[in-house]
Amino acid sequence: MDSGHTIPILGNGYVRYIDHLGSDLRIVESARISYKSPSKGEDQDKKLLSYLYKNRHTSPFEQCSITYNIKMPIFIMRQFVRHRTFRLNEWSGRYSELADEFYIPTQWRAADAKNKQGSQVSSELDHAALTQEVKEAHEKAYATYQSLLQKGVARELARAVLPVSIFTEVYVNCDLHNLIHFLQLREDDHAQMEIREMAAAMRVVAEQLYPWTFEAFHKYRLGVTDRTKSA
Ligand SMILES: Cc1cc2nc3c(=O)[nH]c(=O)nc-3n(C[C@H](O)[C@H](O)[C@H](O)COP(=O)(O)OP(=O)(O)OC[C@H]3O[C@@H](n4cnc5c(N)ncnc54)[C@H](O)[C@@H]3O)c2cc1C
């Protein structure tokens, strides 16, 4: 995959591949150091990787990592930064002026009556009217931000009027073991739709880089809802 390969998400956002370390073979080689044994051919290597995955021998997967450039709304960034093993740097609203780019859902969801974590697209909502109302709120907030800047207010304070739907950008590096842990949590149907869309794009990149690992991921993990099991 070429550096810069970009998957659009959430309107103005994206998940962009920057570079990566290692391969499925690196995982196998790292595991084989235990016995100082050489590769036994592709079939055996693939079987070993699947065995490692299934039996949670997770540390060889930490020998690999991916760097992404991701653009997402700030309210999704707040969920993203909970993943403490990710190494990241973020665009600074102290040092540069934030762009006039806000996330607006294509369809509005209503809260689920029973499941607190759930929401569904609702025909009872007036989608066009809601979109218009939110666009106007964004315009007003951004105009106030500009006005404060023009009056000499520091960027670090003027940004306080901006909504959490504004886009931010990060460079993030994560090892494969913890990326898989993240995907299990954030592609799960308990997670918010927006972060699920972002996680899915991150997985699409990772699948191309580590195909054997993701074959095992789909075989043993996807859909597993037992949260006591870590990847
Ligand atoms: C659907 C959903 C809803 C959520 N709702 C809320 C909410 O309402 N409020 C809220 O505050 N959070 C919420 N969270 C965030 C959640 O509590 C976790 O903080 C987040 O999912 C990160 O999980 P983690 O700690 O396993 O992952 P990471 O931080 O990526 O860590 C990966 C693993 O590394 C280990 N690790 C990392 N750092 C440490 C450490 N300092 N000490 C010990 N072990 C460590 C742990 O084994 C951990 O599982 C929600 C998450 C999800 C998926």
Image (tube, helix red, strand yellow):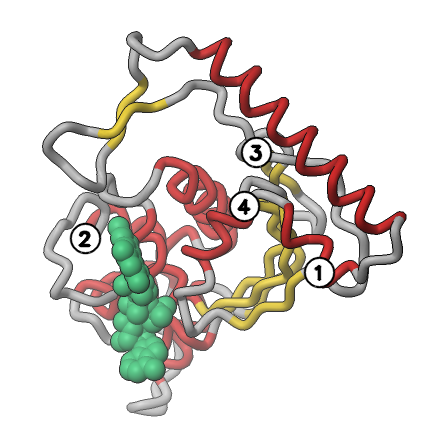
Q: Disc 4 on helix, strand or loop? A: loop
| Rendered position, 93 above or below 219 | below
Give the mark nearest the N terminus, 1 or 3: 3
Q: Secondary structure at mark 2?
A: helix
Residue type (three-letter) at the residue carrying disc 2: Tyr
Q: Comparing marks 1 and 4, which lies closer to the viewer?
A: 1
The amino acid sitting under disc 1 is: Leu
Task: Mark 4 and mark 3 in contact? Answer it, CB < 8 Å.
Answer: no
Q: Is residue 124 left or right of residue 133?
A: left
Q: Which residue is mark 3?
A: 103
Alpha carbons under labels 2 and 4: distance apart: 36 Å
Secondary element at tag 1: helix
Q: Earlier in the sequence, mark 3 or mark 2?
A: 3
Q: Nearer the viewer, residue 122 or 228?
A: 122
Please tell me whether residue 3 is drawn above or below residue 27 in the rendered image.
Answer: above
Q: Which mark is on residue 21?
A: none
Question: Disc 1 marks which residue?
Answer: 157
On the rendered structure, is 174 left or right of 53?
right
Mark 4, Cα crowd under 10 Å, few <14 / some 14-19 / many 20+, is some
